[in-house]
Amino acid sequence: MATSASVTLFFIAEGDAGTSGPAVGCGDSAISVTSQTVTYTDPVEGALRTLLANHAAHIGQSGLRNALADARLIVDSVDRSGTTITAHLSGTLSLAGECDIPRVEQQLLLTAQQAAGTTVAITINGKTLTEALSLK
């Protein structure tokens, strides 16, 4: 059954050092932003789809950065098995340097976990998020 509601998305405050939200590598913070109303059947899918649809490098006048702006990812599925939730994404990920690794990781994980209310595992093109974000 479809639900229409706003979702919580996470973006990056560069150089904030965990002052305004959870600390992210390279001295940044992850800041939650409430979206406009979106329609979804699964809250994790809806939140991630909304996050990934935003290709703006900066969020309005907030000064927040979207480390996923150049990514072209889609949500293929969200699997729920017992207490385990896994979001499967596919597409291309574009990183602007090693500081984007923790930024992208936290934007995806915090957005998914906020929607799920619990821990969420994420795969990209069949690889774990850690493997997908590896510069190797």
Image (cartoon, helix red, strand yellow):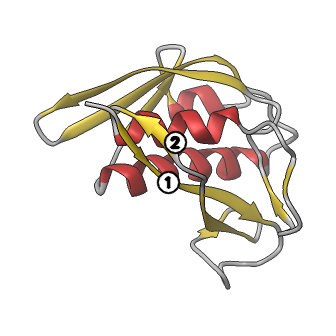
Identify which residue is drawn at 80% across, 36% down.
Answer: 55
Residue 103 vs residue 32, the one in the foreground: 32
Q: Position of residue 127 (x, y in %)?
A: 49, 20
Seen in the picture, residue 52 relative to 23 is either above or below; the reply is: above
Marks 2 & 1, CB-CB < 8 Å contact: yes
Q: Name the element at disc 2.
A: strand
Side (left or right) of 83 relative to 41: left
Q: Nearer the viewer, residue 126 or 79?
A: 79
User: What secondary structure is found at the residue carrying circle 1?
Assistant: loop
At x 69% / y 58%, what residue is drawn? 11
Which label's residue is closer to the chain start, 2 or 1?
A: 1
Q: State how many labels appear.
A: 2
**Location of the N terminus (image quadrant):** top left
Image side of residue 77 versus residue 25, left or right: left
Q: Which corner quadrant of the image does residue 52 belong to?
A: top right
Residue lying furthest left: 82
Task: Name the image quarter holding residue 54.
Answer: top right
Residue that carries the numbered disc 1 in the rendered image = 6
Depth order, front residue of 22/54:
54
Task: Find disc 2 in the rendering and name its residue.
Answer: 38
**Residue in the image at 21% along x and 31% along y:** 80
